[in-house]
Amino acid sequence: MKIFYSAKNYTGETKQGELDVKNERELATQLRADGFILTSFKEIRVSEREKAQVNFLNRFIRISLTDKLMFARNLSVMIVSGLPLSRAIKNIALQTEKKKFAQILMEIYEEIQAGNSFADALAKYPGIFDDLFVNMIRVGEVSGNLEEVLNILALQLEKEHELMSKVKGAMTYPAVILTVMIGIGIVMLTYVLPKLMSVFTDMDVVLPASTRFIIALSNVFQNHGILVALAFASLIIFLRFFMMMEAGKKTLGFLLVNMPIVRNIVIKVNCSRFARIYSSLLKSGVSSVESLKILSETLTNYYYQNAMKDCVVKIQKGIALSAIVSKYPRIFPVLVSQMIQVGEETGKTETVLLKLAEFYEDEVSQITKNMSSIIEPILMVFIGAAVGFFAISMLQPMYSIMDNIK
């Protein structure tokens, strides 16, 4: 059952939040593991009818991170200004340019007008509002500090947007270069090379293996272009479905945490997201166990998800989070476990995690700034090797023809 609780630690610090537990005893045990004593609690009743109201198609509706950020920020400003929640949502819906999102906001407005909670209304659109968003809003509603929770959410989404923008920006340059290179290669193999091949077929010359390979490749593109396009499209579809399976997620996760250059970015990005999201959830009043459960769904890398699930199990047994994280040195650098330990010892875990998040965000920013200078030489070598292979493959038969003429 869902329980909203109030708790206090030995230093007098109070904490409020929501937790899914079997009974009061389990709630008290989990809070004691965090160093808190239960002072009061209230069961949150959710009917089975309400749980089943999530439309299947709503799971596939998506909006941009920017739109979600602006929604949280504008809603926070309006609530602080004294506007009722339902009216604030209606105002945002009327100002939203994207029709689909505006329609969804109006449906949320109608749900609130009908007497449903804001969190329950948001939960009906899991493709837009994930567990992180819904749980923080629910705690904000029950505890009466919704505007503060919205501010935390807006900051979280803003940092998330900045982080993803930097990573995408760093990857755009090599992606464009490789795409153009592949496009030029296909044009050369399909239209230019067949004209050169007629020269070789007229001469009685034994062609080198590299030339025969390029000619065979050219024949495939020229004579079976549609089949190649279909095979490529099928491969993309297969990979997308494969990445949705556990084996695919595990494979991709393994590659990302082991590839040179990429590994460094992936670890820093995930550590930054872990620290900031965990800090935001704790600050909003969500318990450490519930926060780690949300993190296991929010972090996208398979190995980080598994680590969070392990943390959920072990932290309920009374093991400190810093000790659990230290068992994963490959994905969590030593600094992470050390900083968490400092937070546990001083009782300022939220503040310490926020500083850790800022540190890794600065690291990612620095890496992405230098990314072009790192990737450019690698791309130049790769492009040079491809052009050189093609040139040698074409020139070698020419020299053989010249030798025969002599």
Image: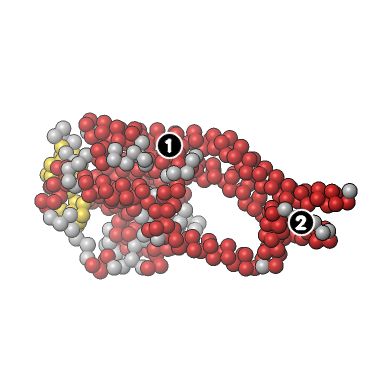
Q: Position of residue 326 (x, y in %)?
A: 29, 38
Point 67% across, 42% down: residue: 384
- Would residue 366 appear left or right of 307 to someone viewing this image? right
**Secondary structure of residue under mark 2:** loop
**Residue under numbered circle 2:** 206
> Counting residues from the N terminus, which is met first, the one under dot 2 or under dot 1?
2
Callout 2 environment at 10 Å: few (<14), some (14 to 19), or many (20+)? Answer: few
Q: Position of residue 196 (x, y in %)?
A: 79, 57
Asked if residue 279 can be seen in this view, the reply is: yes
Which numbered tag is attached to residue 361?
1
For the N terminus, give its image quadrant: bottom left
Give amino acid for label 2.
Answer: Val
- Would residue 83 appear left or right of 8 to someone viewing this image? right
Point 36% across, 55% down: residue: 130
Give amino acid for label 1.
Answer: Glu
Q: Nearer the viewer, residue 62 or 40?
A: 62
Residue 251, compared with residue 110, is above or below; it is: above
Callout 1 environment at 10 Å: few (<14), some (14 to 19), or many (20+)? Answer: many
Q: Nearer the viewer, mark 2 or mark 1?
A: 2
Which numbered tag is attached to residue 74?
none
- Would residue 330 appear left or right of 205 to someone viewing this image? left
Point 30% across, 35% down: residue: 337
Point 31% across, 47% down: residue: 307
**Secondary structure of residue under mark 1:** helix
Q: CA distance from mark 2 to mark 1?
A: 58 Å
Q: Nearer the viewer, residue 252 or 29?
A: 252
Q: Nearer the viewer, residue 142 or 283?
A: 283
